[in-house]
Image: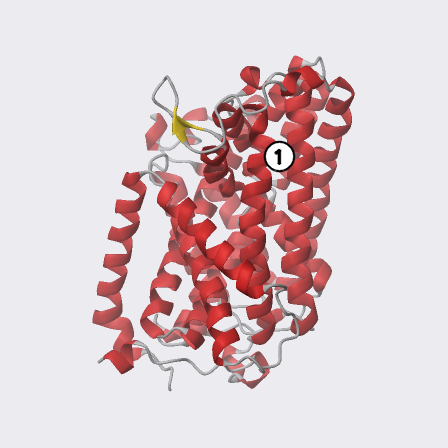
Amino acid sequence: MANSLFRLKTIVRGEDQPERYRLARTLSWPHLVALGVGAIVGTGILTLIGVGAGLAGPGVILSFAIAGGICACAALAYAEMATMMPASGSAYTYSYAVLGEVIAWIIGWSLILEYSLVVSTVAVGWSGYAAPLLHASFGFPLELTKGPELQGIVNLPAIFIIAVVAGLLMIGTKESATLNALLVIVKMIALAVFVAVSLPHFDGANLHPFMPFGFPKALAADGAERGIMAAAAIIFFAFYGFDAISTAAEETKNPGRDLAIGIVGSMVACVAIYMLVAVAAVGALSYTKFADSAEPLALILREIGQGGAATFLAGSAVIALPTVLLAFLYGQSRIFFVMARDGMLPESLAKVSARGTPVRITLVTATIVAIIAGILPLKEIAALANAGTLAAFIAVCVCMLVLRHRAPEAPRTFRTPLPWVVGPVGIAGCCYLLFSLPAKTQIWFACWNLAGLAVYFLYARSRAVAGE
């Protein structure tokens, strides 16, 4: 029993897979960097800087650095594992090869939760930007954009944008990646405009006091948990997404080189972008005026008399937010694909089209997340996405350290610098953030994984095709 629960998967390279399961290698490192930046830079920087400022004041700049540092440790571990095991599946695959089957199932099940909720939540967020435009231009009924939690019927724009992105992925990976790269450029231009317009209004007085609520998480006078670390636990939401790159291993032309460039490159770029935007934001306007705003960057631009730039920023969000959907829907479909290929899910879902794309599993994935986005209330469960992400990050850091001990001489195209520092820091940082989530979120996450273990013992375990 114990041996079967912790049996290890033998990694089979993409070109050695049966033809019906073989993905087309069409991606190079610019596609991967764009995929990572597209996933990471999204609703987080557009909204969470306001939430973070409400928790940390101007010190939100430091919160971004801390959250980015923790994610950077995980990114380095991902880069080493991805180049050692250039196979689709990300943290699920690494855990299966290093830690054992039942651990891999828990991580895969957690990733399903993460990606489903992220895609659904971003689709609803896109709908929030697009709905006023649709209403003003075409008279589209606003009650069809809200969903039941906001007294609407069904969120049709959210379902529509998921269908469009899924269609792109089914047409072909390279084609969708190229369009994604173009939309990422639009997003970067919008943020560059924000920085260029707001920096001339920088006032050093807005940075004082820099840490009005202190550094550690602590209860403030109003009963809320505030401080630099409290903000970092929330701002972490804005950083993950680079893990979607590792799911592209079997579709990358030169995985030994390109995966490391894509993962590390996208994280470095995004930490720099976030820090620059944060400095521009808190320097241009007192944090008390945009703290907890749903649209802090647009609000800052309006407050400094730049209404035109604010409108441009909102319009760019409508155009470019689908890059987040594309990256996460892509990642989730590949996680599903590999679990089906391993027999953990119905194996028929793992077949690919003549173009080398997993059309069946992409369609199933899109249907699931469209249902969530269209009809289910998300406010209280969206934080569950974080729990799944943190579990995956911890697992990848553990896998890196286990292999450094178990197979120190194994070929490593990319080697994490100072692994016995980076790995433990990544694990400890992610554990801290996981236990900083609301108690309700932790309970729901535990319930999700208990349900997942039931599925494993009743279905997946007896059908898994992995050998010793």
Q: Quadrant of residue 220?
A: top left
Q: Depth check: 274 or 246 in front? A: 274
Q: Residue at x 55, y 59 (%)?
A: 422
Number of residues whose C-alpha sits closer than 10 Å to that of mark 1, classed few (under 14), some (14–19) or many (20 or more): many
Residue 246 visible to the viewer: no
Residue 104 drawn at (x, y percent): 38, 69
Q: Position of residue 361 (x, y in %)?
A: 44, 64
Amino acid on which disc 1 is placed: Ala
State the scheme by which the image is colored: secondary structure
Which corner quadrant holds the C terminus?
A: bottom left
Dividing the picture into quadrants, the one containing residue 84 is bottom right
Locate residue 418 relative to residue 5 in the image: left or right.
right
Q: In the rendered view, would you say 301 is above or below 20?
A: above
Whether residue 352 is visible to the viewer of this picture, yes or no, is yes
Q: Looking at the image, which residue is at 42% across and 36% down?
A: 155
| Left or right of 457 in this view: 360 | right
Percent across and percent down for residue 335 are 46, 64
For image coordinates 57% across by 57% down, the residue present is 75
Q: Secondary structure at mark 1?
A: helix
Quadrant that contains the N terminus: bottom left
Instruction: Report the front residue among 148 and 8.
Output: 8
Q: Is residue 63 left or right of residue 25?
A: left
Give the quadrant of residue 218.
top left
Q: Is residue 50 above or below residue 395?
A: above
According to the image, label 1 marks what residue?
317
The spot of residue 86 in percent (x, y) is 58, 74
Q: Who's the residue at 55% across and 51% down the image?
A: 71
